[in-house]
């Protein structure tokens, strides 16, 4: 039934009941007697309440739709309003659900494209750092060595010092390049890459350990990259925000050929902090490969990031463009 007829009939029912009462047991004399006025006022209040209740029931699907509209989040897809009955509200709900599905698909495609472009750009910068700046510094290092070998004693010490500084710069550039593009991921595979990544975050105040169950189902390269980047952001967040003394990265097999990644710290917890670019980036990457991402409190307090991916059947969009 259309919204128009629904509201019309609701009001008609209330008015017809009122008229039937006036024609039947209720009478009104002129001037109105106190008892009659009382009955009329009580009748009016009852009518208004009945009207309000019936309208509330009639418009409930609209309220549900509004609620979904307010809470819809493209990074947490799947929230839909149940379509009840026929008529305009049902049509509106169906159209809204279809629009949400279309927006989610478009969002996934466009964020896939953006992330691919970002990975490609990172790879290019890493390559250039390695090939251009790295080669130049290596050449400088050799020249310094050459000069130091032939220089008189007082200058030699200075040249050795310059050599050390250049070597430190070279190491730094290699580290930045490695971080920009997880080369270890391609060279040594996900397990070593995750171990190396976790070890990078260990300091005297933060113990960082990776626990990787052997014999995990094979993963698509795009999935491995997502796991790596999400672990990287999780560890960065722990180092930056958690005030933790312990952080663990777990990679383990789950039922149905699924793999679970956990990044768990014992810090102050994420609480109700607003999500920034880091966490929404995690959500976008997870969406891209159809993985489930959960962020919340761990079993012993602190923050826990849980990611579940499916082995070997994951979407390869990232891989196509970024690798
Ligand atoms: N492990 C954690 N422990 C405590 N708080 C956290 C943790 N991870 C995230 N947070 C909180 O969640 C917020 C959002 O994190 P998010 O990674 O999205 O953004 P960010 O780290 O502030 O900035 P960036 O965009 O550089 O990542 C943080 O500002 C922080 O307050
Ligand atoms: Mg962050």
Image: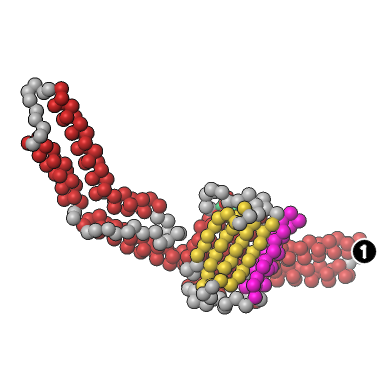
User: Magenta segment: does it hold 57?
Assistant: no
Can you say whether 259 is above or below 6 in the image? below
Residue 128 at least partly seen = no
* Residue 26 placement, left or right of 157: left
If the image is split into quadrants, where does the C terminus sit? Answer: bottom right
In the rendered image, residue 174, in percent from the top left (x then y), is placed at 69, 67
Q: Residue at x 62, y 77 (%)?
A: 215
Q: Position of residue 103 (x, y in %)?
A: 37, 61
Looking at this view, is 138 or 32 the one in front? 32
The residue drawn where x is 40% and y is 52% is 71
Number of numbered discs: 1
Query: In x, y percent, where is residue 310?
Result: 51, 73
Q: Quadrant of the N terminus?
A: bottom left
Above-or-below relation of 164 to 272: below
Residue placed most toward the observer, 26 or 294: 26
Q: Which residues are magenta?
A: 190-214
Q: Residue 187, can we see it?
A: yes
Residue drawn at the location 13% of the way across and 26% of the way down:
36
Drawn side of residue 255 relative to residue 134, left or right: left
Instruction: Check disc 1 and report the residue beneath it.
Output: 153
Indicate whether 217 appears above or below 233. Answer: below
* Depth order, front residue of 316/135: 316
Image coords of residue 290 (percent x, y) = 47, 68
User: In this picture, is 122 found above or below 220?
Assistant: above
| 65 left or right, relative to 248 | left
- Is residue 195 part of the magenta span, yes or no? yes
Q: Which color scheme did the rendering employ for the protein?
A: secondary structure
């Amino acid at each position: 039934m259309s919204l128009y007829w629904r509201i019309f009939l609701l009001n008609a029912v209330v008015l017809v009941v009122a008229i039937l009462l006036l024609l039947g047991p209720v009478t009104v004399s002129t001037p109105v007697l106190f008892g009659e006025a009382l009955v009329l006022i009580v009748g009016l209040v009852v009518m208004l309440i009945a009207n309000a209740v019936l309208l509330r029931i009639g418009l409930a699907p609209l309220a549900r739709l509004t609620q979904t509209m307010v809470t819809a989040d493209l990074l947490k897809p799947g929230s839909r309003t149940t379509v009840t009955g026929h008529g305009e509200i049902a049509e509106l709900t169906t159209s809204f659900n279809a629009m949400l599905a279309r927006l989610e698909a478009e969002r996934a495609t466009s964020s896939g494209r953006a992330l691919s472009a970002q990975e490609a750009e990172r790879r290019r910068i890493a390559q250039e750092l390695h090939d251009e700046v790295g080669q130049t510094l290596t050449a400088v290092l050799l020249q310094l060595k050459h000069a130091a070998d032939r220089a008189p004693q007082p200058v030699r010490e200075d040249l050795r010092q310059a050599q050390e500084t250049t070597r430190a710069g070279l190491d730094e550039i290699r580290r930045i390049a490695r971080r920009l593009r997880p080369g270890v991921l391609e060279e040594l595979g996900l397990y070593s890459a995750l171990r190396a990544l976790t070890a990078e975050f260990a300091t005297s105040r933060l113990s960082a350990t990776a626990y990787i169950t052997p014999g995990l189902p094979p993963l698509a390269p795009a999935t491995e990259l997502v796991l790596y980047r999400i672990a990287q952001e999780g560890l960065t967040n722990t180092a930056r925000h958690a005030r933790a003394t312990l952080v663990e990265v777990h990679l383990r097999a789950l039922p149905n050929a699924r793999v679970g990644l956990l990044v768990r710290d014992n810090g102050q917890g994420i609480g109700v902090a607003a999500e920034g670019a880091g966490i929404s980036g995690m959500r976008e990457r997870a969406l891209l490969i159809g993985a489930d991402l959960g962020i919340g409190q761990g079993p012993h307090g602190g923050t826990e990031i849980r990611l579940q991916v499916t082995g070997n059947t994951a979407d390869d969009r990232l891989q196509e463009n970024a690798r």
